[in-house]
């Protein structure tokens, strides 16, 4: 380990790290671990460019780490790292298209206002009027002398949870904490508060106080929900946004952490129709739907919840289809996932998967993903999207 001497000498020259999160072990501003860099670069060369000189690149990176505490990924390394992080995401059923993730390289962007502007650009480019494209925007990494920016919202588009006078919540009950925080920072919520008010983005530079940025309404495509058979469904005035863009999972590639790297795919009907609008601590709409369907709700044994649930998922899928907005269904997506697993096997790779996340929340046993086990996920696998550092 001849580098040890060099590296500690280099570290001594670095200004004190400003490390804002006490999150996943490697989302810190410590100098990059050369072994992690070497492992990643070796994988990159093995999978993409076996002809190019790995040893030259390794020497270069080692030098850069020794003098600066970090190193800069090439454009190709960055794209490969982000795509493989997706490929490694054990909870994601949509991984068949991991290699077509579109990369927006914004590593030069730090300032919260610029991050916000780029997030809006991300939404517009990923939405494309409904022909949704899987996209990631990668902002400045954590460096030993400078922390990257942070987005405190779990997704770029989330609906507020307004506390009401009677002690209840209006909106998406999942988002009470972030809504309270936005209010405390001075967000003036719409009056009267609605059920589907898009939250502002809370963005900070390192550990500084977050700043608020409204997401312009024309950057948020939403679908009004109707039902193919029941006209009354439209009167419920339900809606959902087109693009799920996760914004609170740091991306780690070859020892470098990008704390802000929002990424999106497209929705699966069940995520909206069988969870977001239905979970008891979210919109809790099954009793309302069952009532309108005139189902017998006197006992769980009438299966009124199950029947209402299917109609809800139908409405969501139908509405997205009518609006021309990309949305997968759980039957087709399950088939695609098994194609992915098979492709990975052919490529000689493990394909870790978390059964409890992969199996859809309705009709699990009707889909082929239910009837088998998967390679056990290993939390140390890299590159990866890390679990969000904030609650
Ligand atoms: N389940 C989350 C939601 O309903 C989105 C997670 C990511 N989903 C996706 N299809 N890429 O908002």
Image (tube, grey):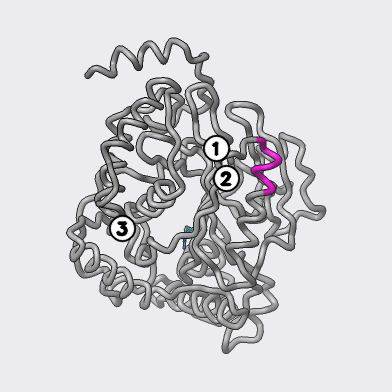
**Residue that carries the numbered disc 3 in the rendered image:** 356
Vertical arrangement, residue 356 with respect to residue 2, above or below: below
Q: Give the residue displayed 34% in from the left and 28% down from the top.
A: 62
Distance from disc 3 to disc 1, alpha carbons, whole Å, reads: 33 Å
Q: In the image, is residue 231 part of the stretch drawn in magenta?
A: no
What stretch of residues is rendered in magenta? Answer: 111-117
Report the front residue among 9 and 350: 9
Query: Is 170 placed left or right of 264 in the picture?
Result: right
Could you tell which of marks 2 and 1 lies nearer the N-terminus?
Answer: 2
In the image, what residue occupies the spot 35% across and 44% down?
A: 383
Q: Residue furthest bottom?
A: 229
**Residue 156 at x, y = what percent?**
60, 52
Which residue matches tag 1? 140
Magenta-span inclusion, residue 114: yes
Binning the other alpha carbons within 10 Å of mark 2 as few (below 14), some (14 to 19) or many (20 upward) gives some
Counting from the top left corner in percent of width and height, residue 211 is at: 70, 36
Question: Considering only order in the chain, which callout, 1 or 3, is on the residue closer to the N terminus?
Answer: 1
Q: Is residue 98 left or right of residue 379?
A: right
The residue that disc 2 covers is: 106
Query: Marks 3/2: CA distance?
Result: 34 Å
Q: Nearer the viewer, mark 3 or mark 2?
A: 2
Badge 1 marks a residue whose secondary structure is loop
* Above or below 209: residue 49: below
């Amino acid at each position: 380990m001849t580098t040890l001497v060099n590296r500690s000498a280099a570290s001594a020259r670095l200004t004190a790290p400003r490390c804002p999160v006490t999150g996943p072990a490697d989302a810190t501003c410590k100098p990059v671990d050369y072994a992690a860099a070497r492992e990643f670069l070796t994988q990159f060369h093995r999978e993409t460019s076996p002809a190019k000189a790995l040893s030259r690149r390794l020497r270069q990176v080692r030098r850069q780490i020794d003098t600066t505490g970090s190193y800069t990924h090439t454009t190709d390394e960055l794209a490969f790292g982000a795509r493989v992080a997706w490929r490694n995401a054990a909870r994601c059923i949509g991984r068949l298209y991991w290699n077509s993730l579109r990369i927006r390289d914004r590593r030069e962007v730090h300032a919260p206002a610029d991050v916000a502007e780029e997030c809006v650009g991300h939404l517009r480019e990923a939405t494309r009027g409904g022909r949704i494209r899987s996209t990631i925007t990668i902002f400045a990494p954590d460096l030993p002398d400078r922390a990257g920016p942070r987005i405190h919202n779990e997704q770029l588009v989330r609906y507020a949870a307004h506390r009401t006078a009677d002690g209840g919540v209006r909106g998406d009950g999942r988002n009470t904490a972030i809504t309270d925080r936005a209010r405390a920072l001075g967000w003036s919520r719409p009056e009267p508060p609605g059920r589907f008010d898009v939250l502002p983005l809370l963005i900070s530079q390192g550990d500084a106080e977050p700043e608020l940025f409204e997401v312009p309404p024309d950057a948020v495509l939403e679908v009004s929900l109707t039902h193919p058979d029941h006209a009354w469904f439209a009167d419920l005035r339900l809606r959902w946004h087109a693009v799920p863009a996760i914004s609170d999972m740091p991306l780690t590639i070859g020892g470098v952490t990008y704390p802000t790297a929002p990424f999106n795919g497209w929705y699966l009907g069940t995520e909206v129709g069988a969870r977001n609008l239905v979970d008891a601590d979210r919109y809790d709409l099954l009793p309302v739907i069952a009532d309108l369907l005139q189902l017998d709700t006197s006992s769980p044994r009438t299966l009124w919840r199950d029947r209402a649930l299917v109609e809800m998922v139908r409405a969501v899928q139908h509405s997205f289809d009518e609006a021309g907005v990309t949305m997968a269904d759980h039957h087709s997506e399950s088939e695609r996932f098994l194609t992915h697993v098979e492709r990975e096997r052919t490529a000689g790779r493990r394909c870790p998967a978390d059964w409890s996340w992969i199996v859809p929340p309705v009709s699990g046993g009707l889909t082929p993903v239910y009837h088998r086990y998967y390679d056990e996920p290993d939390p140390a696998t890299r590159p990866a999207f890390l679990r969000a550092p904030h609650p």
